[in-house]
Image (tube, helix red, strand yellow):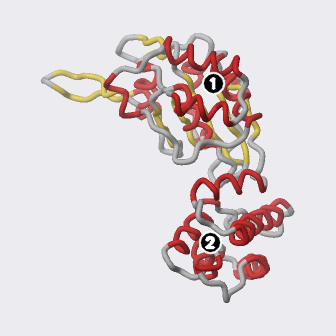
Amino acid sequence: MNEEFAYLKQQGISEKMVEEVEKFRSRYPVSETEQGRRSRPPIPFFGKEILEMSIAGILQGENLLLAGEKATGKNVLAETLAWIFGRPIYNVSFHVNISSAELIGTDTFRNNEVTLRKGSIYRCAESGGFGILDEINMAKNDAVSVLHATLDYRRIIDVPGYERISLHPAARFIGTMNYGYAGTRELNEALVSRFLVIDMPPLDEKTIDYLLDSMYPGMKPAGKAAFSGLYLDLQKKAAKAEITTKSLDLRGLFGAIGTISRGLAPYPAIRMGIINKCFDLFEKEIVQDVTRTRIPEEWTPEDIF
């Protein structure tokens, strides 16, 4: 617990809010069977304003909807909140085939009788976990109908043929959604009204430097500046619609840096992590040109680490 509170103080979170988090954790202990679902994110979220908004919403008993472009830290924030509050995590990744059965549960035959095999939403509600509803704007109507009842003020789930369950007082749901992904759609007004919505800002230089320092503390200043600048350059190009967001891949960037730390030259590494994710030749040429202004082809791993 001390690590979580040290992190909150490092981020500059108000003392009153930290005290309220401590009271929440003391009020709602986690059972032994759920301890395995608690985890610390590899790199906790960075950003005081967004953190304070999120923590205040959770303390108030609200559910959160994190909306924004790709690579803005939505899932990292959701996992960080669960870690701060000491809650077990239940992940639901929505797609067109997710139905109410996967969320609530399905009938199964066990010990010579029909019983309910509980779904993720049911188990989260029952145990007081934090449910991360990933890509919630891909949910189809059948799944959305479950969310309506679960997320509103009644905080109950009706299971057809079984008992009605009330949500544990510590249970919260955190939805994430990207704009404009294939297969997504506009969330209906009734569902949005059940959330407090946080618009996730794009990454800035300070945040990228924090991530690079956390993941690769051995990077030289020139290498860190080059990779941070490359990502920000691509972000500007994508914002102006000069390229798509395919190359705007933070995971790919960090993966490329990881291969450099293993001995691969920087330019081939960035080709794997960023450039080759563009399948349109014209777009690939733009990304290559941007890359060459930041990462010279003659650089070696020693120029980075």
Determine the image quadrant of residue 76: top right
Q: Residue at x 54, y 20 (%)?
A: 150
Q: Amino acid at mark 1?
A: Asn
Q: Amino acid at mark 2?
A: Lys
Mark 2 secondary-structure assignment:
helix
Residue 277 numbered mark, or none: 2
Q: Compared with residue 161, is residue 144 higher up or lower down, i.e. above or below?
A: below
State the image coordinates of residue 2 (x, y, percent, origin top left): 52, 29
Decide if residue 4 is on the left or right side of residue 246.
left
Closest to the observer: 231 or 219? 219
Mark 1 secondary-structure assignment:
strand
Q: Residue at x 56, y 29 (%)?
A: 84
Say which residue label 1 marks: 63
Q: Compared with residue 166, is residue 72 higher up or lower down, i.e. above or below?
A: below
Closest to the observer: 116 or 219? 219
On-image quarter of the C terminus? bottom right
Residue 95 appearing in the image: yes
Residue 197 numbered mark, or none: none
